[in-house]
Image (cartoon, rainbow, N blue to C red):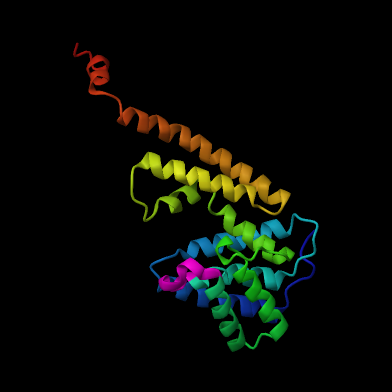
């Protein structure tokens, strides 16, 4: 199923304006990455084009653009979905978006994360939820997962893999899981090399003596 309709010229202009707003908001934040927002938008469009449900393109893309706006304030990062929904409503009011569309987009923002404790229900909500989850998988997800973490690499990797397994199991669409499988294979290829390197780093110096023919 392709999107249920095409975007109007006004909607395209609004989304481009929204993109600049989000870019500026994340540029001023030290807690999140604007490239993640763009990646979620791309995943959302890709998922929407490969599922059976009819999907509104404006709601989906706007929701993807605004989904992490709540993270631009570190104080509310732990409830960024709920806080982001409020910010999204205020911003969309400023753009003169009609009330029904505004509320629909705000719900996408609120329900894109498990931290809101409100599971996604509509196709648009599920799409942005899955798109956000997919960017936590694969190599880029691993890199983002290491940022700001403390402890041994082995501990961080184990915890990361456990969480990503949980994320994968919560994906809503078969197509999302197909994308997740591809990202997982990419990650496993890298993890095989990384684990080998980590193992060699922990090898006893006795092994080095033998390898370098010192005994």
Most common secondary structure along the magenta stretch: helix
Q: Nearer the viewer, residue 213 or 80?
A: 80
Q: Tell me where residue 3 sits by quadrant.
A: bottom right
The answer to whether 41 appears left or right of 74 in the picture is right
Instruction: Check residue 210 for magenta coloring.
Output: no
The answer to whether 150 appears left or right of 16 in the picture is left
Q: Residue at x 73, y 74 (%)?
A: 7
* Residue 72 at x, y percent in the picture: 45, 72
The answer to whether 155 appears left or right of 91 in the picture is left
Q: Look at the picture and state if 66 lies above or below 159.
A: below
* Residue 77 at x, y percent in the picture: 46, 68
Q: Nearer the viewer, residue 119 or 42?
A: 119
Q: Which residues are magenta?
A: 71-81
Q: Residue at x 51, y 44 (%)?
A: 162
Residue 19 visible from this viewpoint: no
Q: Residue at x 63, y 60 (%)?
A: 129
Q: Tell me where residue 12 sits by quadrant.
A: bottom right
């Amino acid at each position: 199923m392709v999107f249920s309709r095409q975007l109007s010229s006004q909607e395209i202009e609004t989304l481009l304006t929204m993109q600049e707003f989000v870019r500026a908001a994340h540029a001023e934040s030290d807690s999140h990455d604007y490239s993640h927002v763009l990646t979620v938008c791309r995943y959302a469009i890709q998922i929407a084009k490969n599922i059976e449900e009819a999907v509104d393109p404006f709601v989906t893309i706007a929701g993807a653009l605004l989904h992490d706006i709540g993270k631009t304030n570190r104080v509310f990062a732990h409830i960024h979905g709920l806080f982001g929904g409020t910010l999204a409503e205020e911003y969309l009011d400023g753009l003169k978006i009609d009330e029904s569309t505004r509320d629909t987009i705000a719900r996408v923002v609120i329900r894109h994360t498990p931290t809101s404790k409100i599971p996604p229900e509509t196709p648009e909500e599920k799409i942005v939820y899955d798109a956000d989850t997919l960017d936590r998988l694969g190599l880029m997800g691993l890199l983002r997962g290491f940022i700001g973490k403390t402890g041994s690499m082995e501990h961080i990797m184990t915890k990361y893999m456990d969480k990503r397994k949980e994320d994968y199991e919560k994906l809503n669409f078969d197509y999302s899981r197909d994308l997740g499988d591809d990202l997982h294979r990419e990650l496993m290829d890298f993890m095989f090399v990384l684990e080998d390197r980590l193992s060699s780093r922990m090898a006893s110096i006795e092994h080095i003596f033998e390898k370098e023919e010192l005994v």
